[in-house]
Image (tube, helix red, strand yellow):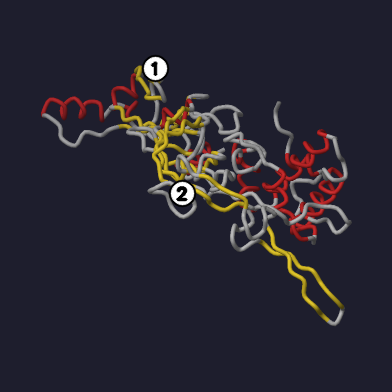
Amino acid sequence: MSKRDYYEVLGVSKNADASEIKKAYRKLAIKFHPDKNPDNPDAEVKFKEAAEAYEILSNAEKKQRYDQFGHAGVDGSAGGGGFGGGGMNMDDIFSQFGDIFGGGGGGFGGGFGRSQGRRTIKGTNLRVRLNLTLEEIANGVEKKIKVNKLVQAEGVEYKTCGTCKGQGQVTRVVNSFLGQMQTASTCPTCNGSGQSIDKKPAGSDQNGMVRKEVVIPIEIPAGVEDGMQLNVRGKGNDAPGNGVAGDLLVVISEVEHETLKREGQNLHYDLYLNFADVAMGTSVEIPAVGGSVKFKITPGTQSGKTLRLKGKGLPSVNGYGKGDILVHVNVWTPQTLTKEEKKALEVLQKSENFAPNPTSKDKGFFDRVKDVFS
């Protein structure tokens, strides 16, 4: 099932500012809050959907990628599954967005919400750079990445925290001129997890974690670009106490192709021909991703002309169409000539057909540039 447009989910236009986006999300979150809709799975789905949309549209960088590439540009950035498919859980939502409602721990100021008790510990993220060839980018590819990550040591055991008795928070009562007041804060012993380490295997750190090399298979979608970051949820460092693993952030690095130059979805190729080829016409093979394309050069083709091979470029990362290969024709002028070659050219030089005679169809440099980018 395809995802709905994030603007449609929140009910705002693409020109909505941060204040409008925040207001729309708050309205939906209150409407579909699970405490207000017990035993209603559809409400919880809509609650998570709204949180995912808000996570993207409230972040300027993610919003820009979404506006440019659609869901494919941010899948994995959002908590709703995306590239890693992990999904955003309720703890994620309340910990990330609870503050916009003005209440602690996700409270909504209306008497309902989540308490600040035991919290889920999340592992730290890992970042790797992945080199991809143009062929891999064009077709999409599965890669197996080796990472050194923190994992729970074999044999580690945890027990209920003795300080907070597993609640994740400690309370204290203070006397004031208004009377007794009770305050709650995160447990300093277990950092809110409600657990402390009971058995720590040799070689593990104070949290019972060890470093281990792990091979992680990931699917790279076709059309990714240099510098784009993909988020593989739950493949980062593990968290102690059976918490939630962090994410693996994969930064794309494009390996430069030998002959093709990339510009978005389009590819550029410089074709060098001799004078006889362009004067009489010829057949050439143009390199393309995954092979080559046969192409005819018509007689009289001018140097500097740009020929377009439709649909032979790269796919869009959001799955909409393909770019082109733009072939730039260059006539190669020999720098040394034999006596026989000079004599032949001297005869041709006096021919009327060799006198420059451009027409309105023969565009100048600036017109050609405009054609390329139009």
Q: Quadrant of the N terminus?
A: top right
Residue under label 1, please give it: 294
Q: In the displayed image of the protein, which residue is found farthest to the left? A: 339
Q: Out of 269 and 134, give the one closest to the viewer.
A: 134
- What SS does tag 2 mark? loop
The disc at residue 314 is none
| Amino acid residing under circle 2 | Lys
Picture layout, residue 293 above or below residue 173: above
| Residue 154 visible (yes or no) | yes
- The quadrant in which residue 3 appears is top right
On the rendered image, what quadrant is the C terminus found in? top right
243 on left or right of 41: left
Label 2 or label 1, whichever comes before in sequence order: 2
* Closer-to-camera residue (33/189): 189
User: From where the camera sits, is residue 71 visible?
Assistant: no
Which residue lies under the disc numbered 2?
200
Whole-number angstrom distance, CA of label 2 to CA of label 1: 66 Å
Q: Is residue 278 above or below residue 44?
A: above
Q: Looking at this rendering, what residue extends furthest in the bottom direction?
A: 177
